Image (cartoon, grey):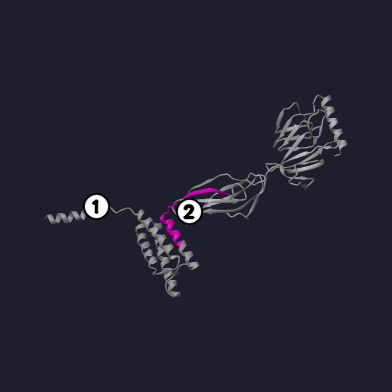
Amino acid sequence: MNTQNTKKRIALAAIVLVCCGFLFADEYYAGGVTVDINRDVLGYLWVEDATVNLFENAHIVNDAFYGDIYATSGSVINIYGGQIDGYLFITTSENGMPEAQVTVFGTEFSVGGVPVDPGATELFLQGQELSGVYADGTPFAHLVDCAVTANFYLTVKLGWLESAAKIEIDQTDVDFGQVDIGDTQSAFVTVFNTGNANMTLQSVSILQDDNVQFGFVPLQQLPVTIEPETAIEIEVLFSPVAEGTAEAVLQIASDDPDQAVVEVNLIGEGMRVVMTAEEQIDMIMKYYATSLQDGTITGVGDRRAAWRKAMAFGKTLLLANRLIGAGYDSQALKIVQVAQKQCSHEKLITGEGVPVLSEMLDELIATLNESIEPKPQWHRYHRNWGKNHKNKK
């Protein structure tokens, strides 16, 4: 926009102000007042001998008079956020006051798509687009027109902000509660970038003891870039392998200059699963069948003898299964005890899977012992009474 057109547009606005009693000037400020704007302004904004601050929700709306801002002599306008539908005019008025001071605060300034030298503090623009990024990460683009008076050029000031990433997390403690041993419970930790520059998430790790019970779902790639005012989720897992409380620390590393590593405390309690005898013998038989297939358990002896012994042990387990299913826990206990001895002494079967099978049989024996009610002792008392009575005779 050339200077002649700018003057005509300002003159038209001035005529409207005088003739229409500011009817179309939705915002007009003078007399040394200070105003904060964080809302819509319909029409245009005229500032003379006043201070106006524009924030995130400020919107100079194109309504009848182009949605322009007119910064005239004596005005101070600080633009921290917002949108201008029309032009930002920096001009003068015949009031004898100092030049208008208009400052746009942000980073990554460009003029017509060409980056501005970071050392530049002001620009003389005529109908050109000034773009950049506000402190909250919101991009902006304003058409700016600076007036020329004689040999004096008015300018728009640049308020360069420090550009940096800032990491924040939605929680510093995750309690998984009680989880059965063998099960897995998950939770999510959200990682935010509340800074005004891209943040690089460099690594995710967990500090824990030798019982590896905590983990996380790996991200698709690391490092990963998180843009300002965006976030990603990290899924954390708890899979207890032992009974009791377990603790660990999730560590998240980024290029946040003030906080390179943030930590999340993880806690959970492993609960031993209480299984019925039927469930235990069923699990034992499935484990035995799988172990025979993958070779972790084999029969003792050469090929033919090994096959027979492995089948014999399997029949012992099958008999115990049928007795338990029929409710004959006492008889089943004896069979399981025989199987456990054969297992622990490797008389019929051998292999790296045998110790696990032996432990499973021990747990089944304990369950069966608990299910068998103690036998009444009256018959023992009756027998002793008979002997004592005979001796008395």
Tell me: residue 214, above or below residue 63: below
Q: Identity of the amino acid at label 2?
A: Pro
Q: Is residue 216 visible?
A: no
Which residue matches tag 1?
Answer: 378
In this picture, residue 17 sits left or right of residue 207: right
Which residue matches tag 2?
Answer: 240
For mark 2, give the secondary structure: loop
Cα–Cα gap, marks 2 and 1:
47 Å
Tell me: residue 282, above or below residue 19: below
Q: Identity of the amino acid at label 1?
A: Trp
In this picture, residue 303 sits left or right of residue 261: left
In this picture, residue 206 sits left or right of residue 79: left
Magenta run includes residue 354:
no
Q: How many marks?
A: 2
Tell me: residue 13, above or below residue 366: above
Toward the front, the furthest residue is: 151
Q: Position of residue 107 (x, y in %)?
A: 71, 44
The quarter of the rendered structure image containing the N terminus is: top right
What segment is highlighted magenta in the picture? 261-285
Q: Position of residue 59 (x, y in %)?
A: 74, 35
In this picture, residue 283 sits left or right of residue 388: right
- Where residue 269 is drawn, which disc sits there? none
